[in-house]
Amino acid sequence: MKEKEISEFYNIGWSNWNDFVRFYPASIHRRKFISKQIKKIRQWTTLADFGCGNALLINILFKNFNNTSRKFFGLDVSPNQIEANRKNFPFIKFETIDIGNEIPHQKFDVITCSEVIEHIPDYKKAIANICSCLNPGVDK
């Protein structure tokens, strides 16, 4: 699929998947597991969720780990979902990005990317793009 087709696919998809992602047991356990792993990281100030979709994960992480010095970012290929997220979660910064073809202009201390990589045609490039914006040396 081309970039525009991918964006449109997820624009349509996210209008139908919200309840499934919210209530599906595997999704619930995945969010708990990720939160538990992040709790082990001692010092960090920026967290990005690549492929944030409907922002359930990033919102839970915000609720669990927010303090005055931390910033939270949600990135997704769907412009429609990013706009909805900006309205629903104004305390989190959101950006439309195709991580398979673009690199964010910012570095992050913690990055989550759940249920995303397997949907990207050039997953190796996407992983390289994600790794390129990870700050080195965050204390575990």
Image (cartoon, rainbow, N blue to C red):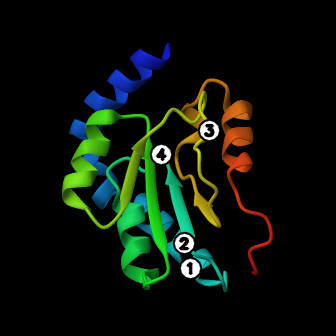
On the image, which quarter does residue 81 sit in?
A: top left
Q: CA distance from mark 1 to mark 4?
A: 19 Å
Q: Give the residue type at disc 3.
A: Ile
Q: Secondary structure at mark 1?
A: helix
What residue did someone put label 2 on?
A: 33
What residue did someone put label 3 on?
A: 103
Nearer the observer: mark 4 or 2; the answer is: 4
Q: Secondary structure at mark 4?
A: loop
Do the numbered discs 2 and 1 sit on residues whose CB atoms are within 8 Å?
A: yes
Quarter of the image containing the C terminus?
Answer: bottom right
Nearer the observer: mark 4 or 3; the answer is: 3
What residue did someone put label 1 on?
A: 36
What residue did someone put label 4 on?
A: 51
Do the numbered discs 1 and 4 sit on residues whose CB atoms are within 8 Å?
A: no
Q: Is residue 87 left or right of residue 57?
A: left
On the image, which quarter does residue 4 sit in?
A: top left
> Is residue 21 visible to us here?
yes
Q: Give the residue type at disc 1.
A: Lys
Q: Tell me residue 82's x, y (percent).
A: 31, 44
For residue 101, which numbered disc appears in the image? none
Q: CA distance from mark 3 to mark 1?
A: 27 Å
Q: Secondary structure at mark 2?
A: helix
Do the numbered discs 4 and 3 sit on residues whose CB atoms are within 8 Å?
A: no
